[in-house]
Image (spheres, helix red, strand yellow):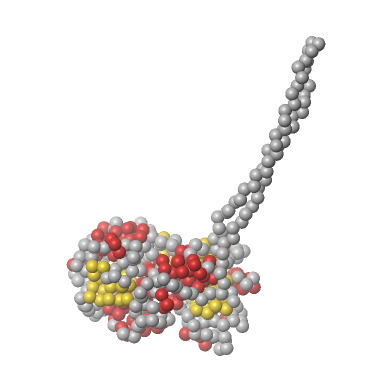
Amino acid sequence: MESLYLISPPALTFRSRRRGSNDTVTSHRSSSCSSVAALQRKRSVSTMPTTKPTTKPKPKPTTTETTTISPPPTKKKVLVPIGFGTEEMEAVILVDVLRRAGAHVILASVEPELEVEASAGTRLVADASISNCLNQHFDLIALPGGMPGSARLRDCEILREITSKQAEKKRLYGAICAAPAVTLQPWGLIKRKQATCHPAFIDKLPTFWAVKSNIQVSGELTTSRGPGTAFEFALSLVEQLLGETVAKEVGRGLLVPVDGGHPRKEEFNKTEWFVDHNPQVLIPVANGSEEIEVVTLVDILRRAKVDVVVASVEKSVQIVASQDTKIVADKFIKNAAESIYDLIILPGGVVGAERLHKSKVLQRLLKEQEATGRAYGAICSSPVFLQKQGLLKDKRATAHPSVLSKLTSQVVDGAGVVIDGNLITSSGLATVTDFSLAILCKLFGHARARSVAEGLVFEYPRN
């Protein structure tokens, strides 16, 4: 990968085998007005010697009307199955990116319940049970990895049947992380196909066909390596499903770095964040919060053994995120407020940020956090919330490009991650992995952050 710098995102490239397009259907409808051939009718006449002649009306011409109908394009249908121990970053990034591209994505549980606890403890609620998907047509089936999630997918007979039919009919299917080796390989669905997977499972693939690329497209099959390559994987699938133009547009909207580079990180007024205990981190969530940011933060911080609490500011612990992913929080914000946190991080999402701003409990927690010198931060559109609370005063910060103009603090132009003393901000979405690793670097040091990045299969700067 290039080093730390992202200049601009004009040309995103993703490997693909084919493109999809929506057909426009033209239909002809005939409608005719019936010919009115009025027959001369005999009128009742009296016995008068003379009668008026009856005039015969001219028949009306028959017309044929041809109408061109352009029906709304049919959405591509995608299945993303999940089970206990599924890697949440991979599942959620797949769902989020494909929905942004306009696909109809079904998140399906292979467990008896719709609520599934993922590998890092995030609780996701599926849209449907896998049994409801058995006789449906899918344009793409994409399997997230994680353990034991990949094994749970492998052991689901219904999913095996669905995916095998998909391969037989030469429709698109893919897998990431452990799933190519643990799920597809036992099903015989990567036979005589080059494939890649997480480095920890590469020896389970046939030696001759195994490759170490981030993305491998072999006919209808696409495979990838891990959470750190999930954006690239998802965008490759978008390109094959909906075309290169759509993939590039979605990639730009996600702030995906060009050519594998990293967003620039800048730090001012350097202070130490080290603590003499296991760090406690609060991530408040609301309806409309950006799910990629919530799940990535939780996943990466918990990999480093950080004690993360996800707290809902809504009346329910279950929230519906910006791209309709349903996430179950650990507790309500009022209960979370009983503890002290070393760091409070606000995820983005325009609607979610506005709903977080309405929480009086969260406002109080953040003011106490700043007053006591403990760390806090925000990503995407949420730095605007911090500004409204007066928490960006005399601070350098960044945010999503769409809200940068609303910040009156010192904006660091072009930076993906900005640290100023005890404040950390980021532009959001695809920069969230760098943002999360920057937090680990502040809490534990560069070596711990780099170790976590290796497990993600994410290239992290050496210094």
Res 101 visible: yes
Residue reaching furthest top? 48
| Residue displayed at 35% across by 68% down | 428
Closer to the camera in the image, 156 or 427: 427
Closer to the camera in the image, 350 or 159: 350
Res 86 visible: no
Tell me residue 212's x, y (percent): 49, 85
Tell me: residue 451, above or below residue 102: below
| Residue displayed at 30% across by 64% down | 404
Q: Quadrant of residue 90?
A: bottom left
Tell me residue 124's x, y (percent): 44, 66
Q: Quadrant of residue 183?
A: bottom right
The number of numbered badges drawn on the structure is 0
Tell me: residue 39, above or below residue 47: below
| Residue displayed at 42% across by 68% down | 252
Tell me residue 186's x, y (percent): 58, 80
Quarter holding the N terminus is bottom left
Closer to the camera in the image, 263 or 384: 263
Q: Is residue 196 left or right of residue 449?
A: right
Quarter holding the C terminus is bottom left
Tell me residue 33's x, y (percent): 68, 38
| Residue displayed at 49% across by 83% down | 213
Q: Quadrant of residue 341?
A: bottom left
Q: Is residue 56 left or right of residue 333?
A: right
Closer to the camera in the image, 307 or 162: 162
Residue reaching furthest bottom? 207
Q: Is residue 321 left or right of residue 49?
A: left
